[in-house]
Amino acid sequence: MLERLASIEKRYEELSRLMSSPEIASDPELVRKYAQEQVEIEELVQKYRRYKAITDELDATKSMLDEELGEEMQELVKEEVARLEGERERLLKEMKAMLLPKDPHDQRNVIMEIRAGAGGEEAALFAADLFRMYTRYAENHGWEIELLNLNETEMGGFKKAIFAVKGKGAYSRLKYESGVHRVQRVPITESSGRIHTSTATVAVLPEVDEVEVKVDPKDLRIDVYRSSGPGGQHMQKTSSAVRITHIPTGITASCESTRSQLHNKEKAMAILRARLYEREQRRQEAKIGKLRRSQVGTGERAEKIRTYNFPQNRVTDHRIDLSVYRLEDVLDGDLDEFIEKLADRDRMERLKALGIE
């Protein structure tokens, strides 16, 4: 990695020389090209130079430990060594992250889908808990939640909830939440006090616009119908709910969150575009032999990324083998510890794939 950083610094210096030469200076297009390239690597080069300076300072400070110093001075030198080592480690971590190609989706809004899996009514109640958890997480980060589709049960559970999370960097954080979430607790429907295991699936899709996903109107079938609340309550007299079917793929998207048929149609199209985009991404990855696992699996109990165990007050993320014993806080949106460690693991794996240690 340090060899690569040295090479980038060398290129940075070369760009400075090129732009100062009379031949290049007379070509505005070339100057603009080189200036843009230099801007893109400038922050990384500055961190690398700071890293080298810290390393030199650290070596000099450590050498003082070999000298005959008083006890108080010895302690001060040790503290300075610890501070410099901490700063150097921080710079190293930041530089590794900057060497990775940026995920083009990271700054986007997302469309999230939560569906009750195995476990009947208890699974639906758990899906509602997850929806609240992500709503609170979004609030903590200053993001906006827009409900797109909701299918409730009579007991207040969610068979399905589809919603948009709008805010800078939403996808960069929430993309790690895709998969099967498992809950272990005594359901309110259980009279004997026996612990049940249920699941809900979560899918996280980047929001895409019309330019990125072109949909021929001829390929769409649009159905309108009356929306209803749980158990058939709140039946609307007008047909404002919209279901759109993409005929070539069979992919469907529906929305009944507003009383406006036009608004529901717009939201259903946003969901459909996100699903079509995800489908195309998977198809392209399969072509080059990088087929990844489905985000949500089948919803069976064995396929889980995270377990929420109520009797033990424990939440365990099985991908990083991390357990915390503050379940209530997590369900109240305190997810950053998991997401930070998942992001670190992702960076490590991507660096390893690039041959950077």
Image (cartoon, rainbow, N blue to C red):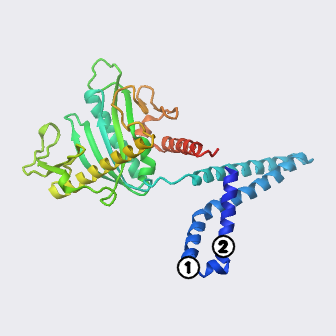
The picture quadrant where one finds residue 286 is top left
Closest to the observer: 125 or 100? 100
Q: Residue sitting at 34 percent across and 24 percent down?
A: 186
Indicate the quadrant where residue 185 lies: top left
Describe residue 211's horizontal placement relative to residue 93 as left or right.
Answer: left
Outermost residue on the right side: it is 68
* Residue lying farthest to the top in this orientation: 192
Q: Within 10 angstroms of label 1, few (less than 14), some, or many (20 or more) residues?
A: few
For the C terminus, the quadrant is: top right
Identity of the residue drawn at 16% across and 42% down? 229
- Tag 2: amino acid: Leu
Figure label count: 2
Determine whether 22 is above or below 55 in the image. below
Give me the C-alpha separation between circle 2 and circle 1: 13 Å
Vertical placement of residue 53 versus 86, above or below? below
Q: Position of residue 130 (x, y in %)?
A: 35, 39
Write down the residue under mark 2: 18
Q: Is residue 1 left or right of residue 36?
A: right
Query: In the image, is residue 322 above or below residue 106?
Result: above
